[in-house]
Image (tube, helix red, strand yellow):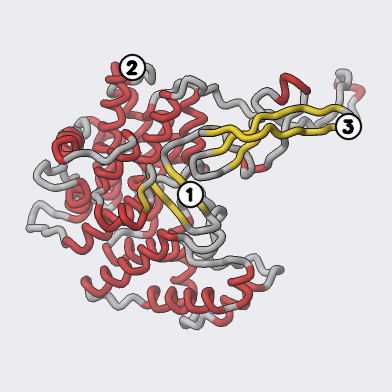
Amino acid sequence: MTRREDAVLRVGEQEYTLPVIVGSEGEIAVDINRLRGASGLVTFDRGFANTAETKSAITFLDGEQGILRYRGYPIEQLAEQATFLEVAYLLANGRLPSRPQLDDYADEITHHTMLREDMKHLFEAFPKEAHPMHILASAISALATYYPDALDPGDPWAKDISMKRLLAKVPTMVAWSFRYGRNQPFVYPRNDLDYVANFLNMMFSFPTENYEVDPTVSKALNVLFILHADHEQNCSATTVRVVGSGHANLFSSVAAGVHALSGPLHGGANQGVVEMLESIVGAGGGIGPFVQRAKDKDDPFRLMGFGHRVYKNFDPRAQIIKRYAQEVLAKLDTADPLLEVAMQLEEVALGDDYFIEKKLYPNVDFYSGIIYRAMGFPTELFTVLFAIGRLPGWIAQWHEMQQDPTTRIGRPRQIYVGEPKRDWVAMEDRSA
């Protein structure tokens, strides 16, 4: 972290000198920490799109160039060569693990995958039609009641064991929630399977028959989890940080992140893509009318899975996912009409002047839902799969914030636009 020449803010006749900070990849920030104290002024920034609340060493994202790196490692290399738990270790610890370190880490997580038996009653208390994201947030929050001795964010042991427990138990929660909703028996974790294979086995195996995890499916799901593992200061990561800034425990903070991810503008977009493709196929499969509707500014219809708040060129994750979508469908011998429509839409988006001008390129959500669908996951589970992948990022963001001595409780300012001071009016004197 380096400093540049100070910035100067002029308001009327008054000038204020503000420090300038430069990040390791050249990002430049004007430090306004002391602005309000010195001037009484605050900045106004809807959605915090122009505000850096923290200095983070976890993820670097360059939307203009289509670059995504975890701890300096390009996402393309991690997706091809790493396991999901390797990436989880990297995000939390800042370095790739040695073989003994990874073995010990994976072994600890494997031996924490079991849930307390009485947690079954929690899942059984929900309506069967309840959305899996709401169930997951509740189950994660409930973990705090099972481990009251490990909730102190200032205790290194408590932080470490909570991070491992959370990574270990969330796939079991998701699988048990899914099985309950389908009136199927709960499947317990297996310590002889790796992280992804164990999750697939809990989701799709039955006691009455042998279930073999397809290595192509397992590899693709591992890649999808890695691609979703972190994405800088997005809506859910910021939520985890803000909740954690009040010294809330990890389980409560991540449960809040799950709720943030559940919104259709954040994690729910991949479900929206599949629903959109289904509507196009249901209308006959012709994409022309839908493309024209998307171009009509007076039509509320939007093509889901195109464009991104941050990426202005292309989403590097989408390029990786596209290839795995084709591999999974070929291996499973699945002729999915949704994929055919998706490829037609992508071709239009990459060649149509309207889409090019507005930088509406396929994003990470565009193909992920098609892969999940081919694997046998129901549409309502897509956002939950996103949450499993995002766990290491939430954990790393929370952990980094707790270690930072400059962290302050999240407390944004506002510009009050309500009524000025006025006096109480007695009931009989109030107008209708």
Q: Nearer the viewer, residue 317 or 111?
A: 317
Question: Which of the 4 quarters of the picture holds residue 52?
Answer: top right
User: x%, y% of residue 316?
Assistant: 43, 60
Residue 377: percent from the left, percent from the top?
Answer: 30, 59
Q: Which mark is residue 61?
A: 1
- Name the residue located 54 percent from the left edge and 63 percent from the top edge: 313
Kind of residue at badge 3: Gly
Residue 425 visible? The answer is no
The three-letter code of the residue at mark 1 reads: Leu
Q: Is residue 42 left or right of residue 135?
A: right
Residue 12 is tagged as 3
Where is 367 relative to 86, above or below? Answer: below
* Amino acid at dot 2: Asp
Q: Around disc 1, counting alpha carbons within 10 Å, would you say few (fewer than 14), some (14 to 19), or many (20 or more)? A: some
CB within 8 Å, label 1 to label 2: no
Disc 3/disc 1 C-alpha distance (Å): 36 Å
In depth, the one of 264 and 366 nearer the eye is: 366
Asked whether the residues under the numbered discs 3 and 1 touch, taking CB atoms below 8 Å apart as contact, a structural biologist would say no
> How far apart are the alpha carbons under marks 2 and 3?
49 Å
Q: Is residue 135 left or right of residue 292?
A: left
Which numbered disc, 2 or 3, marks the residue that appears first in the sequence? 3
Q: Tell me the CA gap for discs 1 and 2.
A: 31 Å
Nearer-N-terminus badge (3/1) = 3
Q: Residues within 10 Å of mark 2 (few under 14, many from 20)?
A: few
Residue at which label 2 appears: 155
The answer to whether residue 75 is visible is yes
Q: Position of residue 50 (x, y in %)?
A: 64, 43
At mark 3, the secondary structure is loop
